[in-house]
Amino acid sequence: MNNRIVISSDHVDSHGDVMTKLALESGAEIINGERKVRMGVQHKKDLPPLGKIINARVEESDGHYYLVAEQFEYDTYEDVSWNKDLVKASSSVDNHPFNEPDFDVPEKLEITVDRQNFKNYSDFESYLTFVESIHSEVQTGEFGRKAQINDPEIVLKLTEYFLVYKLLKPALEKTAKKISEKVSDKLTVESEKLYDFIRKSLKEFLLRVIPKNRPVSYVIKLAGKPEIELFAKITDPEMLIRALKQNKLEKLRDEIQAINVNVDFEKIQFILTEKGKWKFNFLLTEKGETIGRKVSFKKRDKMLELVTKKTKARKK
């Protein structure tokens, strides 16, 4: 099903931001690129896509500019032969890949946050300054979301010099190399620094973040082709740190290998359960398909229904 909507405009939005005509045109170019923007629900990274955003253009009306595009929903859902708990969503007429898989491995640790999760710009800048003070090799930045409620979120992109990366990425290589004791010792030291960084950056974030009293979505990205993404919704950094220890990562590596035997993918995401275990959530293929757990799709549809009801209620 296709539904044409206004993505953005040069009006002041609910967050006090204004998009210029040039920025809107840039957005249209991204949407119309060979890789497509996901059609999601409230920018929630842990929910599978509904489909893609396509055919964008900038239109003028009443002296203002609007970025409009089509929401192109998946029209085919089918069970996966190699796992009864999974389903594949695809389009019968479109096989463009998504633009969200991150293939560029950074030279420095990168951390990004949403400015809307802070009381003001000064508080946002103070947090980034704090983050830079607790790690000598870190790049800070921001991302933007236009949701009804922007849940607190941190995105951490790792370099290849951490144990998490060295253990998980070889799972996708045909000939995995064994980590030597000397290299392993160095990785252990660097990993302890990473755990300390996660611990301090999250605690400081919780002190400053709005809305208060909500768990933080902590997203760890292992860039490269394919990308591995670890998603944790937490209030206690120690829960995430325990899940990044070698024994937990080795089990996760084995699961990635088992999935990769059955399907090639450009991105795969695992979520941290309440019991502190990593569980497969969904993956994206180079044809723009999504394969995920049936419960994940049901969770997505339930959230969409809730958002739709709230939107209709506000318009009355």
Image (cartoon, grey):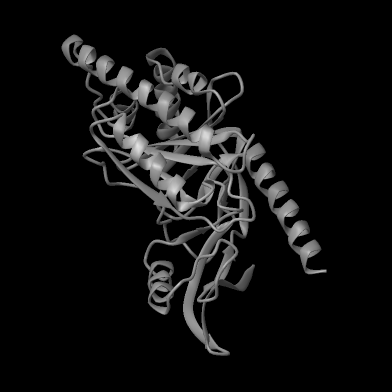
The residue lying toward the viewer, choosing from 114 and 29, is 114
Residue extending furthest toward the right: 316
Q: Is residue 1 above or below residue 193?
A: below
Residue extending furthest toward the left: 182
Q: Position of residue 221 (x, y in %)?
A: 38, 38
The residue drawn where x is 48% and y is 75% is 56
Q: Position of residue 206 (x, y in %)?
A: 53, 33
Along the horizontal axis of the image, is 137 left or right of 52? left
Q: Is residue 85 above or below residue 44?
A: above
**Image quadrant assignment for residue 47:** top right
Quarter of the N terminus within the rendering: bottom right
The residue lying toward the viewer, choosing from 35 and 220, is 220
Along the horizontal axis of the image, is 112 left or right of 301? left
Would residue 218 be visible to someone looking at this image?
yes
Q: Position of residue 5 (x, y in %)?
A: 60, 73
- Counting every numbered tag in the picture gives 0
**Image quadrant assignment for residue 264:** top left
Q: Position of residue 241 (x, y in %)?
A: 44, 20
Q: Is residue 289 above or below residue 6?
A: above
The residue drawn where x is 53% and y is 45% is 45
The residue lying toward the viewer, choosing from 256 and 64, is 64
Residue extending furthest toward the top: 181
Residue extending furthest toward the front: 122
Quarter of the C terminus within the rendering: bottom right
The residue lying toward the viewer, choosing from 67 and 210, is 210
Would residue 111 be visible to someone looking at this image?
no
The residue drawn where x is 50% and y is 51% is 120
Q: Is residue 299 above or below residue 145?
A: above
